[in-house]
Image (cartoon, rainbow, N blue to C red):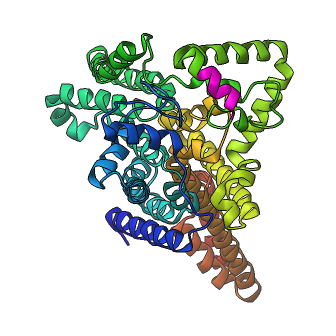
């Protein structure tokens, strides 16, 4: 129980246990992952990175490459049998989710304390959404959560500690190259994470500048290795599609699905080419890149003509991101469990605790906790302007877990402190009614022990000691 590795093992066993129960139950407990699964199928057949939708042939950049490539490996290993590949994806997601316990522990230990770190990783092990999403969605959200948590952790540890600075300087270029490569891998998994890259690099540069350590070389190495790590995929997209697409192409469509005249709340999922025959025909007629640009142009025209509607929809998506008030109605497994009210309540309380933890952490040290603030506040912005779901926010859920545990720890410490102070005050009061000497003794003991976090000054402590001595003398 005292080791994060135990939490990793327990988390994996718990997820695999629920996976077994879900497959035994069958029915509505089916896994979802259309585009990634279709591309993985095409890859395994030797058709290249293509065919994200049924009936759509040819090369694509609809999804980021890393996760479909992992699924394609499953198809190859399992003789192209879709059902075992679904289980393969669920097990893979469960492994990613369980491994996230480790960077959670390191992150919380660095920023807060070993106790908060241990409780945080065990909380993640049993967190309902951290069990639900890896099994329900054959998608990249569990891998993205692992990668983003590891990147935040690495960002916090990169500024050299005095005791190990020499060792780190000896391998400085290798460390920074590894950091940049990790960012490239994360961006090729989930490009939304890229919003945080310039902010993290700026924070690291300022940290090194403050300490008088050279920063241009290390930051340059990180940027260079990140770019080099992404160049092969970007070059492939240009060669296959004839357009510059750094990672994936589908932003225009996602933007339009959340901003068009048919949107009543959140987005129009039924207008996607996967569901709408007319849109599917238009996609085939225009081609992927032209279609995406056309949809982005239509979305921008709609926003320009209806700015109030855009703001209202963005606010609805903001609320849904943190409370699941709309997501609870459409999530297949939540509905199958008849847990929509519990799901929304859990997500709302969880979000409030994480926000409280962030505020408390920022009050203690706003600059040192900047990477945490940036990740929690900025990562979901993409989904406010396109369309939302709680699983889209999942990459920052490990960070939210740490902050929520920290908030509970702070509240518990404060309540315990007040309770102990009140108990000691009552003891002093009751003792003074019976014996001034006893009151003096209790007061002196309380003063000697002190109260953790008390704002009393040294002068006030001396005055209390003097009063205690006078009480004893009068007796």
Q: Is residue 462 visible?
A: no
User: At x 59% / y 57%, what residue is drawn?
Assistant: 410
Q: In screen coordinates, is 458 left or right of 202?
A: right
Q: Give the quarter of the image for residue 170.
A: top left
Name the quadrant of the C terminus: bottom right
Q: Is residue 321 visible?
A: yes
* Residue 394 among those drawn in magenta: no
Q: In screen coordinates, is 345 left or right of 358?
A: right
| x, y percent for residue 348 | 71, 53
Q: Give the quarter of the image for residue 350.
A: bottom right
113 or 349, which is in the foreground? 349
Name the quadrant of the N terminus: bottom left
User: At x 43% / y 59%, what residue is drawn?
Assistant: 83
What's the magenta bit mostly, secondary-structure-wise?
Answer: helix
Q: Is residue 82 above or below residue 224?
A: below
180 or 63, which is in the foreground? 63
Numbered range of the magenta stretch? 276-283
User: At x 25% / y 31%, what residue is drawn?
Assistant: 178
Q: Give the quarter of the image for residue 415.
A: bottom right
Q: Is residue 356 above or below residue 343?
A: above
| x, y percent for residue 345 | 73, 59
């Amino acid at each position: 129980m005292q080791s994060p590795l135990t939490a990793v093992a327990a988390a994996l066993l718990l997820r695999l246990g629920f996976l077994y129960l879900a497959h035994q139950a069958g029915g509505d407990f089916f896994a979802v992952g259309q585009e990634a699964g279709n591309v993985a199928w095409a890859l395994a057949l030797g058709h290249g990175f293509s065919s994200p939708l049924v009936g759509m042939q040819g090369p694509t950049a609809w999804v980021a490459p890393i996760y479909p490539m992992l699924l394609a490996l499953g198809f190859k290993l399992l003789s192209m049998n879709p059902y075992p590949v679904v289980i393969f994806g669920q097990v893979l997601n469960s492994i990613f989710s369980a491994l996230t316990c480790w960077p959670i522990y390191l992150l919380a230990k660095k920023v807060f304390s070993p106790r908060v770190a241990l409780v945080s990783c065990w909380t993640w092990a049993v967190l309902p959404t951290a069990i639900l999403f890896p099994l329900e969605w054959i998608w990249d959200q569990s891998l993205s959560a692992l990668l983003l948590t590891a990147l935040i952790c690495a960002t916090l540890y990169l500024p050299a500690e005095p005791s190990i600075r020499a060792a780190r300087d000896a391998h400085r270029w290798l460390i920074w190259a590894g950091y940049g490569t990790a960012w490239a891998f994360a961006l090729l998994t989930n490009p939304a994470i890229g919003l945080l890259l310039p902010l993290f690099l700026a924070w690291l540069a300022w940290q090194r500048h403050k300490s008088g350590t050279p920063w241009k070389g290390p930051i340059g190495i990180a940027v260079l290795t990140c770019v080099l790590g992404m160049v092969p995929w970007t070059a492939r997209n240009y060669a296959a599609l004839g357009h510059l697409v750094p990672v994936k192409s589908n932003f225009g469509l996602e933007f339009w699905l959340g901003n068009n005249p048919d949107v009543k709340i959140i987005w129009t999922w039924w207008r996607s080419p996967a569901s709408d025959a007319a849109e599917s025909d238009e996609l085939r007629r225009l081609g992927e890149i032209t279609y995406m640009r056309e949809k982005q142009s239509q979305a921008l025209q709609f926003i320009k003509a209806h700015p109030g509607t855009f703001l209202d929809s963005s606010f609805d998506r903001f609320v849904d991101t943190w409370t699941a008030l709309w997501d609870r109605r459409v999530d297949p497994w939540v509905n199958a469990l008849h847990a929509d009210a519990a799901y929304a309540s859990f997500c709302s309380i969880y979000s409030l605790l994480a926000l409280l933890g962030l505020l408390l952490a920022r009050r203690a040290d706003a600059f040192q906790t900047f990477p945490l603030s940036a990740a929690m506040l900025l990562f979901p912005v993409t989904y406010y302007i396109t369309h939302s779901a709680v699983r889209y926010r999942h990459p920052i859920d490990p960070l939210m877990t740490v902050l929520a545990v920290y908030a509970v720890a702070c509240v518990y410490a404060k309540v315990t402190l007040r309770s102990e102070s009140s108990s000691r005050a009552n003891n002093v009061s009751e003792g003074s009614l019976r014996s001034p000497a006893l009151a003096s003794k209790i007061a002196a003991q309380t003063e000697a022990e002190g109260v953790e976090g008390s704002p009393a000054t040294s002068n006030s402590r001396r005055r209390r000691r003097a009063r205690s001595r006078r009480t004893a003398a009068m007796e």
